[in-house]
Image (spheres, rainbow, N blue to C red):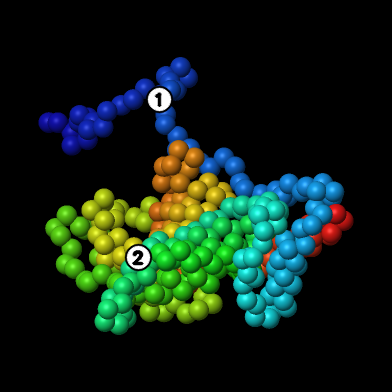
Amino acid sequence: MNSPFAAKPFPIPVVAAGPGTHTEDETLDYLHMPQGMSTFRAPPLPEPEELAGHEGAVAVLQQVLDAAQALLRGEAVTPVTVQGLDAANLKLLNQLLGEGEVSAQVLTQPGDPRALQPGEAALRVRVSVQESVFAGIWRVITTADDGAVSDTIEVATVPAVLQQAAREDLPWAPAKLQPPPSVQNAPMVLVELADHRQHWRAGDTAQVVNLTLLPLTVEDISFLDAQLGTGRVLILSRGYGNCRVTNCCVANTWRVVYYNSQDTVILNSVEVTDMPEVACAAREDLVDSTERLAEVLAWVRQG
């Protein structure tokens, strides 16, 4: 009579282990992570003798410094106008401000036809934003179809025009659609985001949904984007790797995607907040920028 404990075929293949049995797989493909981080670099300063006759640029920088100091004191500040400088002063101003790690644009789009009077045409406006090497000090240039240009310097955690444009995009929210059969998990993500929007209040920390960690298909992502909508605000940050931020056409919702140096997505997320932190200058940045700008002005005045 056979014992019930007699050996039976083992369903899992046995792999030899021990010294000499392990070989390295030389075809491992590691995900490349960002290799560098942007840090402050002082703008190239001209020689003092080259600065004579640049009172216009110095006056603009002094207004910017005054605005930065006022902002740190908790006072309301207004943008500083750049128009009216001659070519030499404008060149010096551009040289001293330089280009920081964050840039942005508000893409052109005709105005809402419902807001137009009979016979009027929609005037398209394009906004370009570039952070200077002094974090929290931004160059904002607005160009209209009729050729009108506004060139200002704004001291803020983030330029007001970006948040304003995001609010203006809300009437263009997409209509709710039934998901096609190929979409599986996107509806649950949309429900979670709606719950975050319902409970989020100004001043709260961002509510982040990390899409990279979720079992989402290409069809899921496409459906999410279609239901959230894509607004006109596009922000690029190069602080650590590359980050692309776009507003959605629903309130306080942003798409935030990080890339490595090979332009491969390493983090894909949706944030419920008034503005993603990656696009903002912190108060500590503004304090540091104010001190550095004061040092630059002191140097310029030696000329």
Is the C terminus in the top left, top right, bottom left or bottom right quadrant? bottom right
Tell me the number on the disc at residue 41: none
Residue 99 percent location from the top left of the image: 61, 52
- 81 or 269, which lies in front? 81
**Residue at figure coordinates x 72%, y 70% from the top left:** 63
**Residue at figure coordinates x 20%, y 57% from the top left:** 183
Tell me the number on the disc at residue 27: 1
- 199 or 62, which lies in front? 62
Q: Nearer the viewer, mark 2 or mark 1?
A: 2
Q: Amino acid at mark 1?
A: Thr
Q: Which residue is mark 2?
A: 109
- 201 or 8, which lies in front? 201
**Residue at figure coordinates x 37%, y 70% from the top left:** 123
Quick check: 301 left or right of 263?
right
**Residue at figure coordinates x 55%, y 50% from the top left:** 238
Residue 5 percent location from the top left of the image: 22, 35
